[in-house]
Image (tube, helix red, strand yellow):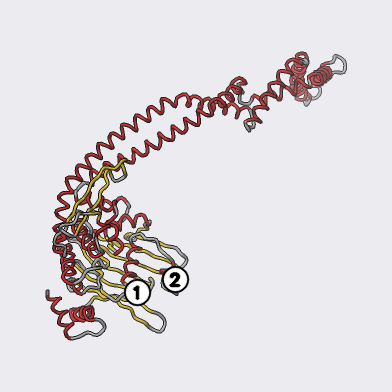
Amino acid sequence: MLTHLYIKNYALIDELDIDLHPGFSVITGETGAGKSIILGAIGLLLGQRADVRDIQQGARKCTIEAQFCLKGFGLEEYFNENDFDFENQECSIRRELTDSGKSRAFVNDTPATLAQLKVLGARIIDIHSQHQNLMLADEGFQTDMLDLMGNAMDQRQAYATCYRRHQQLRQQLAALRQEAEEAGRNHDYLDFQWQQLNQLKPQPGEDETLEKEAQTLQHAEEIKTVLYQTGELLSTEEGGILTGLRHACQQLQQLQRVYDGCGDWAGRLENAYIDLKDLCDDVSSQAERMEYNPERLQEVTQRLDALYTLEQKHHVENAAQLALLAEEMRRQLDKTEQFGDLIAQAEAEEAACRQELESLGQVLTARRNEAARRIEAELAEALVPLGIPHPQVRIDIAPLPQPSPLGMDRVTLMFSANRNSTPSPIAEVASGGEIARVMLAVKRMLASVKQMPTIIFDEIDTGVSGRIAECMAHIMRQMSRDHGTQVVSITHLPQIAARGDVHYKVYKQDNDSHTASHIVRLSDDERVTEIAHMLSGAEVTEAAIENAKQLLRK
């Protein structure tokens, strides 16, 4: 339940700091006093998007914070899954807005996302505003109502899980068929391209190797001449470098007997001679092998031309990328040939899942049909004390042509307020006051199966008055007694205001600078005055005061 609410610098609220109480509470106040502003602030705590215009003019920051006692409502798992503290099963939700447009949210002083607030908010507060009466005509709401009251949520969850899996399989099958169709259209051209690449069989690094070989073949005669001349320069018997080195080495070795340093020099010359001798042999050998080969040059040139042509055609840079492209084309061709098997397998999986989905849908439909008759009777019975003495309520469950996320049925709430009229869809025949009463009865029935710490009714009494309003107040009071739910009713009717365990009043005050909204808890005497004011209007009469006292005594 909501135990405390603090609002600062929000819309017309300078600062609001108030305790709230268990049981059945009522909030009254003139139109425009600020009741909807308070609900708007609570809505921000439940994950609604913020607007910087909500910050009070001139303020830099707006803060909204609420305290909740959630003992006995089974929310431990949610707090553990989201790493929120849950000490003493109490919860604090805080939302901060700044004039720069930034918004921050906290659950028990731990940063929280709006998505987390929405999930938590849906489990701790149900705010029933006037426009939500229109939800009674929504098929989704009617289906939810039937499944909750009929204890069919486990069956619906199993169906929903299978439905999502079936949708995924259908999407995968459709994508596979489209891919197969596109691959079929491109198969011949892709195969032609792959044949070209496969015939060439490009090898990684091949183009670089061939370019070097072509360069060597093109300059073979020049290379052979230079190599031959280099060998001659090194090895000529007279005047050759090797001959001179050998002679110098011998002289230094002879001089060693008279000069010690010559031995080291002779050794170094000997090593140089050996290295140059090996170099000379290599150069001479290569000169002998080097021959101009026009046939091989033509082969290399043709091979390079073929590689360059395909590289340009496929917008790649080298033979390595051509080789990778050929592998990818082969994989695509192989996959095209396998599409038949892949599609057959996907169709089998989709058909098996569809069969399972239909089976789960039939189980869900059976549970709904079983629950519908009981709910019809209970809802009709609940409407009698609300001033509809002969209600006709029927829940039609008709098969859908295709499975939907909510099942294989179309659920329609049929209603008539008269004994001799044929029930029709409730949105087509019910007045505003009748819809409000039906919705209250539905909410009462839902409260018995869906644990909800706090329910706030925002003028659910629209379109009713007198004895019917007293009956609605009685039902809201009983909801708080029977199910341990904190029920708050924002009302303009004195018959409902008089039934509250606690009475709050929202009012506005004007000063020289601005208008501000406030809320206070009324004392017993103040309640008499407020209800008398609701009965008689601007001028409170003695008769109105006496009438107010009688309402409170009842």
Residue 504 image offset from top left, x and y in percent: 24, 74
* Separation of marks 1 and 2 at Cα, in angstroms: 14 Å
Which of these two is toward me, 517 or 445?
Answer: 445
In this picture, residue 161 sits left or right of residue 293 = left
Tell me residue 64's x, y (percent): 35, 67
Label 1 Cα crowd, 10 Å radius (few <14 / some 14-19 / many 20+)? some
Q: Which mark is residue 51?
A: none
The residue pinned by badge 2 equals 60
Corner quadrant of residue 345: top left
Q: Earlier in the sequence, mark 1 or mark 2?
A: 1
Q: Which amino acid type is shown beneath numbered disc 2?
A: Arg
- Residue 255 located left or right of residue 429: right
Question: Can you name the residue that lies furthest to the right here?
Answer: 238
Position of residue 60 in the picture relative to residue 149 (left or right): right
Question: How many other residues sit within 10 Å of disc 2, few (<14), some (14-19) or many (≥20)?
Answer: few
Q: Circle 1 is placed at which residue position?
A: 15
Q: Secondary structure at mark 1?
A: strand
User: Where, by quadrant of the figure, is residue 156 drawn?
Assistant: top left
Which residue is at a point 27% across and 37% down the rendered structure image? 358
Look at label 1 and name its amino acid. Glu
Q: Residue at x 36, y 30 (%)?
A: 347
